[in-house]
Image (cartoon, rainbow, N blue to C red):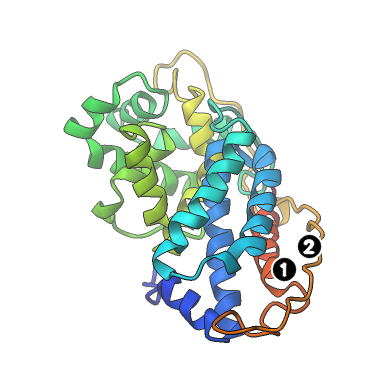
Amino acid sequence: MAETAPQQDVKVLFKQWRSGDPDAGVTMAQRFSDWYYAITVMRLGDQRARAPLEQACQIFAQRIMEVTNAEDLIDFAHRIVLDELQSAGDRSPGGDFPNGITGNQPPSQLLQTAVAQLSADHISVLHQTYARTQKAMDIHHDMPFTVLEARHALKRALAERVGVQFSVLPDSLDLDRGPLPLYEANQLRGNDEERIFEQWLLTDIDLCKDLAEFSAFAHALRAGALKDAGSGQSAPTPVTPITPSTKASTPRPVAPDLPTPKPDTGGGIPRGVLIGGGLVIALLAGAALLFNLMGG
């Protein structure tokens, strides 16, 4: 996969927006909606994620003018989505959640077909990690990069054997992403480590995409989809190769109107930057696009 251009820091975008650059505001909104999508869909699954995602986007847009210091931006934004996740019941224990990425087929069935391409060691480490049969402490010390390697091999097998159309499928591993499968498996050590990882996601849009598009498979892995894989106990259910025409779509949610802001009285966001609900629309349009692409 070709290298992507460096992502502009959201704090820089925030400062530009505060200075009256509406394009910077739209770009910033897209970054936050992508980030919120990755977190909510990974924690909750596609169907449960939509309402808290939309609510978090709206609250962010309604309250962003409260933030005057760019250093407070990420904590402010993260707190919003964490509150919405808590209201929604926080983390799903896993499950079989078909979506557009899976061609509306159960992800567990696609996994059972794809793992025929994997080594027994990779299958074992994926099941141990995601189904939590091995303790997080052991994984951190003994095999963080082995898990990342196994996940990478599985993602490639899903693309090659059953036609899953991933947008992020690098040719080589980025070892800095070692915590990624541990986050997906809810195996990071405590809330602080999870907070650090989620805020780090915001620095890399490809990492957000990787997390979001693999989420259905991560949920299935957590529910034990590979428990009997490679054991010969059962044959995988036949699956239909995924093509662009099999991807699902969903209606776009209606973006709420944002009141026209009052004229700036000194140091605030210039009037016109938010007229017509621009920031809310940008946030929700970004979130809706992701749901349409994923078929959530």
Q: Is residue 265 visible?
A: yes
Q: Badge 2: few (under 14), some or many (20 or more) residues near its Cα, within 10 Å?
A: some
Q: Position of residue 194 (x, y in %)?
A: 37, 41
Q: Position of residue 43 (x, y in %)?
A: 53, 38
Which is more toward the observer, 28 or 140? 28
As drawn, the residue found furthest toward the left would be 141
Specify the amino acid type for callout 1. Answer: Ile
Q: What is the tally of numbered marks visible in this picture?
A: 2
Whichever of callouts 1 and 2 sits on the residue coming sooner in the sequence is 2
Q: Residue furthest top?
A: 233
Task: Say left or right for 6 vs 113.
Answer: left
**Dividing the image into 4 quarters, which one contains the N terminus?**
bottom left
Residue 155 sits above or below residue 15 on the image: above
Labelled pair 1, 2 in contact (Cβ < 8 Å): yes
Q: Report the amino acid beneath label 2.
A: Ala
Residue 122, quarter of picture: top left
Which picture quadrant has residue 265?
Answer: bottom right
Q: Secondary structure at mark 1?
A: helix
Q: Is residue 218 above or below residue 39?
A: above
Q: Quadrant of residue 189?
A: top left
Q: Position of residue 191 (x, y in %)?
A: 37, 36
Q: Which residue is mark 1?
A: 281
Q: Is residue 258 left or right of residue 282?
A: right
Q: Mark 1: few, some, or many residues within 10 Å (few <14, many ≥20)?
A: many
- The residue at which mark 2 appears reads as 255
